[in-house]
Amino acid sequence: MTYQRALEKAWEVLEKVRSENRTFRIGLLSDNYTIDTDSRTVLSDSCNVPAKEYVAIILLHYLTAKLRSKTLPSQTGTWIDFKELEGGEGYYPAFKKRTIDRVLKKYGSVPGAIKDALKRLPGEAADKGDAGVVINPFKEISILFTLSKADEEFRSDANILFDKNISDVFCTEDIVVLTEMVVHAI
């Protein structure tokens, strides 16, 4: 499956809102990316190669939101579930399978091990569940991962929550892709 049409559309939308600047540098997870609007390229600064299409789309959507509003909405400190996003209720089973179930598979038997992700990714420990971390894929965006260990009554469990401001920056589909990127990185 190709993201080519979505990427073309993201460039077109960015073109309508771009500023005098032609080059932008944006941090995403543990890498920085250079976006050149004249050449329509998105390069990873760490290895000087083009970003994968889905990464470029997320970066372009983020940059577009930032340029439209001049400054992105501040974090609210209010955590919302995926089901609270527009269309999230209907898409939740697929989201759970692509993200929460993968976190649970990796960390369900040792919840505290998720905190090792903080050695590689921007974020902080969270006092939620038996183990929790807040990962900041972008400076203004926070995703909370919580894990609860199994006991004699319940299986281990995981959940992913978002600072409420995420829906002011990304559409639900972008949030799924961004969350998958973070899950892969942790």
Image: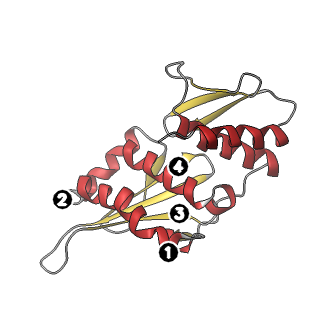
Q: Residue drawn 85% across and 36% down?
A: 19
Q: Which residue of the protein is positioned furthest toward the bottom in this rendering? A: 153
Q: Is residue 163 visible?
A: yes
Q: Amino acid at mark 3?
A: Phe
135 or 98: nearer the eye? Answer: 98
Percent x, y for residue 8? 68, 37
Q: Quadrant of residue 142?
A: bottom right
The CA distance from mark 3 to mark 4 is 10 Å
Reading the image, the residue beneath label 4 is 136
What residue is shown with label 1? 89
Residue 1 — which label? none
Q: Which residue is mark 2?
A: 109
Crowding at dot 3, Cα within 10 Å, few <14 / some 14-19 / many 20+, comes out as many
* Numbered disc 4: secondary structure: strand
- Disc 4 versus disc 1: distance between alpha carbons? 24 Å
Q: Amino acid at mark 4?
A: Asn
In the image, residue 4 sits, relative to residue 125, either above or below, namely above
